[in-house]
Image: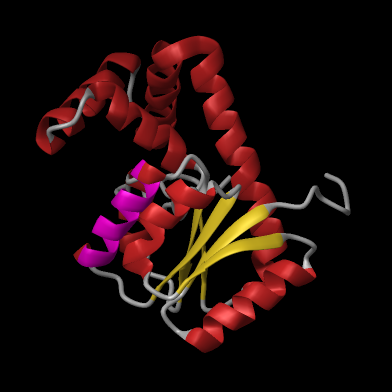
Amino acid sequence: MSSRPEPLRVLVANERVDRLDATTRVVEALGHAVIARELNVADVAQATADSRPDVALVALGESSEHALQLISRIVQEAACPVIVLLEVEDPDFIREAARRGVFGYLAGGELEELQSELDIVLARFAEFHNLEGAFGRRAVSERAKGILMERHGVDEREAFELLRAQARNSGRKLVDVAEAVVAGHALLPAKTSASRSTAETS
């Protein structure tokens, strides 16, 4: 990885003006361009569609279903990775956000970690989309099965049944569930016991 990464076009959203300004300063100090700023997180989905940033940094002050709905809207609208900025680390919220397509997060206002997180999330995003483009949906499903096999200690048939069950329970297509597994695998907190089913941190 180069010590001088290519500048990125960044959208920053935070409903606190002081934190919005602080995040903007950090991003610009790292050599990136803040092309859009939003004080209303509810407007981020449209803003990402309009400005087409390389990455969106979205601060969420609450770990709630409303925040997760906003994440879903943003991910659907944005053809870019989304990093969620959390005031307090919440593993359950992070897991669900990952399932909805978030590619990274920062917790506790650790803005000094921003550069490395940007590098990680963009590499992860590119890998995911290269996989999908080169090999199609079947490759995504196969990758998802491999992740589940490794994570849960199951065989291929059982991994496929896990995907099918999740698709059925959530009312989504199997390939959409597989994409969520692949997208969220590297983000989820590491499991602490055999009974937990979180994904490993890459």
**How would you classify the magenta stretch by its main secondary structure?**
helix
Percent x, y of residue 79 = 48, 39
User: Does residue 70 show up magenta in the picture?
Assistant: yes
Residue drawn 45% across the image and 84% down it: 16
Residue 133 is situated, as x and y percent measured from the top left of the image, at: 52, 17
- Tell me if I can see residue 11 in this picture: yes
Q: Which residue is rendered at x = 38% and y = 30% of the image?
A: 179
Residue 13 position (above or below residue 136): below
Q: Is residue 158 visible?
A: no
Location of residue 32 by image quarter: bottom right
* Position of residue 200 in the picture relative to residue 60 (left or right): right
Point out residue 66 in the picture as x, y percentages from the top left corner.
22, 65
Give x and y (percent) for residue 11: 55, 60
Q: Does residue 138 lie above or below 30 as drawn?
A: above
Residue at 49% over, 45% down: 200
Q: How is the image coloured?
A: secondary structure
Residue 9 position (above or below residue 108): above
Quadrant in the picture for the N terminus: top right
Locate residue 182 relative to residue 62 in the image: left or right.
right
Q: Is residue 160 left or right of residue 84?
A: left
The magenta region covers: 66-76
